[in-house]
Amino acid sequence: MKKSILILIVLLTFSCANTRVFEIKIPSDTTKYLNTITEAELKEHLYIIASDSMQGRETGSLGQKKAANYLVSQYQKNDISYPESLSNYSQKVPSKSLKARNGQYLNDSENICAFIKGTEKPEEIIVLSAHYDHVGSRNGQVFYGADDNGTGTAALLEIAQAFKIAAKEGNGPKRSILFLHVTGEEHGLLGSKYYSENPIFPLANTVSDINIDMIGRRDSDHSQNNNYVYAIGAERLSSDLYNILVAVNEKYTKLDVDFRYTANNDPSNYYTRSDHYNFAKFGIPSVFFFNGVHPDYHRSTDTADKIEFDALKKRTQLAFVLAWELANRENRIVVDKK
């Protein structure tokens, strides 16, 4: 009898200790900032990013430049500046670094960078990334790229605004946040490759990358319900990242987080197919939020009117609370896997 009680006490103590390790310490007013991410504002951004005037945002094109200018205007509007090491919001990506899969070199493109400095550990960086380029126009048809990746682009703008509102109210993140809109993804992850090889901040100080690429639609496996998101790569390098993601989702967004595409033997190989991979290959814990492919993927029919803005909002909010926890927790997440 006494032995059984002793074992129970030990088990309970161990259980409580484990709970404390991944206890979510986000401030109680986080829901307030979470709710600044709205369907209406996401919709406003997306209809501009995926409009005719952007001409499909081909890397190096006039349409891509217009999209870049729109992003800059939104960061300026929200009083969010660029990293001090840059002279403006642009990290220039030279043509010699923009060699497409077909061997051709693309035109003078740019990654767009916005920055909120951390209050306690400013040298440690959380990156939120999304590519803002698409495939342009073909045979007179604009490939709008509303889901790919207008949704991720709009999501970063909303997440940045939420962080800035918090900062203005004295709740700025302890670690710094880099909002990184990369170019050239459609031609081989070129913009994020350039950043990872020419980082604005040392990669050794980069805690994690949260990458967002296509989060506004649903795939055939979820035809009856859009309350899900694929999270790819979270557990590949860091048990902390995986556990924190599970915990913040359970507390705040309650999405069905599907990890199936992280498997080493996944035939789609999504883990290597978006911009997070250029961080992961340098040992930086990274996660890729994704809704899966749909019939309009890489077609001119990927238009803003087909976006499910309720799903887009919840997935954006999940990325926000994950970033917030990573930025504000006491200890930097641990890389415990190769």
Image (spheres, grey):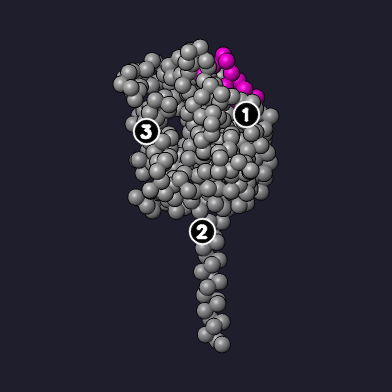
Tell whether position 48 is magenta: yes
Amino acid type of the residue tagged 3 in the rendering: Ser
Span shown in magenta: 44-56
- Alpha carbon separation for disc pair 3 and 1: 33 Å
Q: Residue 196 carries which label?
A: 3
Residue 108 placement, left or right of 289? left
Give the foreground label among 3 and 1: 1
Q: Label 2: how many residues lie within 10 Å, few (<14), some (14-19) or many (20+)?
A: few
| Residue 81 at x, y percent in the picture | 53, 26
Which x, y percent locates residue 286? 44, 42
Residue 205 in sight from this viewpoint: no
As helix, strand or loop, the secondary structure at mark 3 comes to helix
Residue 257 on image: x %, y %: 55, 48
**Crowd tier of the residue under label 3, counting other residues whose Cα lies within 10 Å: few below 14, some 14–19, many 20 or above:** many
Which image quarter holds the N terminus?
Answer: bottom right
The residue lying toward the viewer, choosing from 263 and 117, is: 263
Nearer the viewer's eye, disc 2 or disc 1?
1
State the residue position of label 2. 21
Classify residue 295 as left or right of residue 102: right
As displayed, is residue 248 above or below residue 9?
above
Residue 260 included in the magenta stretch of the image:
no
How many numbered marks does the figure carry?
A: 3
Real-space Cα distance between discs 3 and 2?
31 Å
Residue 306 is labelled as: 1
Q: What residue type is labelled 2?
A: Val
* 196 sits left or right of 314 in the view: left
Above or below for 71 versus 26: above
